[in-house]
Every structure is written in C-alpha cells, then in structure tokens.
Image (spheres, rainbow, N blue to C red):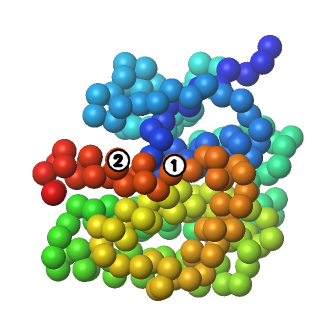
Amino acid sequence: MADQVILLDENASMFGMRVRISLAEKGIKYEYKEQDLFNKSPLLLQMNPVHKKIPVLIHNGKPICESLVIVQYIDEVWNDRSSLLPSDAYERAQARFWADYVDKKLYDAARKIFTTKGEDLEAAKEEFTGILKVLEDELGDKPYFGGDKFGFVDIALVGFYSWFYAFETFGNFSIESRLPKIVSWAKRCMQKETVSKSLCDEKVVYDFAMMVRNKFGIE
C-alpha cells in the first residue's frame, strides 16, 4: 500500500518551502493543501492543535509539525534516498546547530524589517544583516553549508531568499551589496530544480507581505 502524504502549507511560507524542497529532494509525491493563515481550516486545527500553524505533514493519517522536525522526519522515513543530513554524528550535530540558529535568530530579525519603521527599522536591518554575516562566515568558500552537497542547513535557510526582495523593498537596502557570498550561494541553490520549483516567487511573497502589513495596520 502506497504512503499517503499530505502537506498543509502556505505558498509564501519560508518554513513550508523547507518541507517542499525536502519532499522534492526525496522524490516523494504528496497532496498539497493551501491554507488561509487568517481563517484556519478545521483540518489544520485538528492536525496541529498546539501551535495551530503550518506547515504540517500528514503521513498515513499522522501529523508531524514544525518545519525542521518535518525535514528530519522525511530524511529518516525515506532513508533509502539521498540523505539530507550528514552521516557523521558530529557533522549532523553541527548542521542541526546552524539550522536552529536560523530559526532562533534570523526569523525574528527578518520579521522586524516589515513590521517596524524609523530607527527600529534601521536597527532591524543591522540585526538581520549581522546574523546573515555570521552564516556567510560559516559558509566560507564552500558551495553549500555541508560542503559539496546540498543539505539540511541549505534547506533551512534558502526559503528566506524568496523574501529578500520584500526585505530590501521595505528596508530600502541591498542584501547582495552587503552579503555577496550569501546571495551567490542562494543563486547556486536555485540552479537545483528541487529548489527553484519549491520556492515561492519573490513578487508573490512581496504581495503576501504587503497584505500582512495592511492587515495589521503597518502601512
């Protein structure tokens, strides 16, 4: 009997993009169910009653929540295909560390860019680029964060690339001029079909971000 795989997601979500990339990397077929984040479906509330957030992967009727947890689940369950995490225990721990850094540091700084103005916005831009600079230094001259192979940390971070245009527009700054290696890395990732077909178009993301700003009276 074939696996039943359903993804509850929102197209512009950088967290959902992680899951879509991981499923594509593994070649897993799934049913995609777009969610309205402002009018949450009964299915979403049933499958993620704790956080009530996307993405949620439903595998044979059982929900898995939180994007990095889902990515690791995908890697463990479909382990007969290209691995997303390194095989070495130390390298695996390091990958988890940097993915956790993205979640705990970068997202909060990014959110401030399109929810603040004035001096707070300037501070948010500096915080955001500072965190990306730490990641750029960790990347160094490697093609991908894990070395020659696209993997877990790349998946954790690359969804933010779809939001760069919105961040730059709202913040009136250039990410590439400050962080050329990060942008080069993102463009390298985009050469992979599993990435380019999984990421949301930057103009769609911008429109989504504008809608959110308007909804909360930021504009």
Q: How many marks?
A: 2
Asked if the residue at tag 1 contacts the one at tag 2, i.e. Cβ–Cβ closer than 8 Å, the answer is: yes
Residue, x 61% and y 68% (percent of image)?
Answer: 186
Q: Amino acid at mark 2?
A: Phe
Residue, x 31% and y 76% (percent of image)?
Answer: 172
Q: Where is residue 208 shown, x and y percent of the image?
A: 34, 47
Residue 178 lies, with reference to residue 182, above or below; the image says below
Along the line of sight, which residue is nearer the eye, 211 or 76?
A: 211
Judged left or right of residue 78, residue 100 is left
Dot 2: few (<14), some (14–19), or many (≥20) neighbours within 10 Å? some
Q: Where is residue 60 shown, x and y percent of the image?
A: 65, 20
- Residues at marks 2 and 1, CA–CA distance in whole angstroms: 11 Å
Along the line of sight, which residue is nearer the eye, 109 or 172?
A: 172
Q: Quadrant of residue 89?
A: bottom right
Q: Where is residue 157 shown, x and y percent of the image?
A: 55, 62
Q: Residue furthest top?
A: 1
Residue 4 lies, with reference to residue 14, above or below; the image says above
Residue 22 visible to an observer of this rendering = yes
Assign a secondary structure to mark 2: helix
Q: Quadrant of residue 42?
A: top left
Q: Label 2 belongs to which residue?
A: 208
Q: Label 1 belongs to which residue?
A: 200
Assign a secondary structure to mark 1: loop
Q: Where is residue 17 shown, x and y percent of the image?
A: 55, 48
Along the line of sight, which residue is nearer the eye, 127 or 188?
A: 188
Q: Amino acid at mark 1?
A: Cys
Residue 191 lies, with reference to residue 193, above or below; the image says below
Residue 31 lies, with reference to residue 145, above or below; the image says above
Quarter of the picture containing the N terminus is: top right
The disc at residue 23 is: none
Judged left or right of residue 107, residue 120 is left
Residue, x 44% and y 60% (percent of image)?
Answer: 163
